[in-house]
Amino acid sequence: MINRIIDASLNNRFVVFLLAAILVGVGIYSLTQLPIGAVPDITPVQVQVLTNAPGLAPEEVEKFITFPVEAAMSGLPRVEEIRSTTRFGLSAVTVYFKEGTDIYWARSRVLERLPAARAAIPEGFGEPEMGPISTGLGQIFQFQLANDDDPSTPEYSLMELRSILDWQVGFRLRSVPGIVEVNTWGGELKTYEVTVDPDKLLNYDIPLSRLFEALRQNNANAGGGYLLRHGEQWIIRGEGLAGGGDGPPEEALEDIRNIVLDSREDGTPIYVKDVAEVRFAPMIRQGAVSADAEGETVIGLTLMLMGENDFAVVDRVREKIREIQDALPPGVVIKPFYERTHIVRRTIQTVKENIITGAVLVIV
């Protein structure tokens, strides 16, 4: 049999050479497409269900959120175990599937059970949502958003930098193929704060629930159908968002201050500004981020889609970062401080050196 194969190969040299060239070409192409990492990703197939419940203690979160979610996820096919972590204002339930399970199939099964979990959670206690399709090794690119060193450019506060990162940088980075999420750490999350004076509420005989209701009802748009006029349809809109929805933030503050709560006996309206102070304020923070011991800063962490190529995704992120930098306000710079590819390159270089050293020792 072997002699026949050898004879056939010698008699058809061109065909054998062509097949060998094709195999070499396929091998080289496969090598270029092979995902390379510094360490193997041994994360099991898992789907996280996260629920934010601001203000709730861990006991209430466990009782009213974590347990209903765990109960809804029990009995799913190919599930090995269900684990949960309950903290102040946060519930994290992780569903582990058997090895080899398709991650998208697993997420579809979890998605089917989410309505049952939502129905079991009391109203106002949070909405359970699935976490991103990433792993513990998904943080491939990290950067800092800071003021530049040019004294002629404006200097931005931590609240302004956080808003820029959330609404400009992070929004655009999520469009990069292979990136599933951009997390923001540090800074101050901008909120519209209404600080109520209890004594003024008592003087005007206005319950606190009335203030909540007025704020909720006077910050929404509504549709009114259309009118026929001269053969045309005129769309009717009810614009009630504070600041018009796209106006300057200071205009939104003024609109909130001028929301009517009630009226006096003589018909004079009572506004929100008469019983409360309205201003921008940061949300209560649980921590802070600093850089090089030079004070607080704002950083972004990009999470890679499970199974993607580190090198390819980081290259796309770098290119998008350059585009975003050109569109940022003057004085704001993006400073990358961690890239997964640096570790991968050093690891590859170490492997090359070890292979060369081993080959030399074998020859000697």
Image: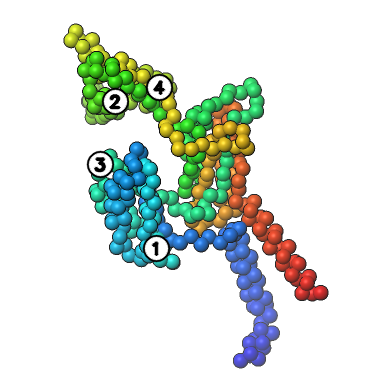
Q: Amino acid at mark 4?
A: Arg
Q: Give residue 16's mark.
A: none
Q: Residue 120 versus residue 9: which sits nearer the camera? A: 120
Which residue is identified by label 4? 279
Residue in view at x 59 percent, y 27 percent: 331
**Figure label count:** 4
First-in-chain label (3 vs 2): 3
* Quadrant location of the N terminus in the rendered image: bottom right
| Vertical comparison of 125 with 347: above or below | above
- Count residues near mark 4 (Cα–Cα under 10 Å), then give few for <14, some for 14-19, many for 20+: some
Q: Give residue 123's mark.
A: 3
Which residue is identified by label 1? 97
Q: Residue 152 versus residue 265: which sits nearer the camera? A: 265
Q: CA distance from mark 3 to mark 1?
A: 30 Å
SS type, badge 3 = loop
Q: Tell me if label 3 and label 4 are in contact, CB under 8 Å.
A: no
Which residue is identified by label 2? 215
* Quadrant location of the C terminus in the rendered image: bottom right
| Vertical comparison of 126 with 72: above or below | above
Place of residue 87 in the rendered image (x, y in percent of width and height, measured from the top left): 39, 46
SS type, badge 4 = strand
First-in-chain label (1 vs 4): 1
SS type, badge 2 = helix
Q: Amino acid at mark 2?
A: Leu
Residue in view at x 58 percent, y 32 percent: 295
First-in-chain label (4 vs 2): 2
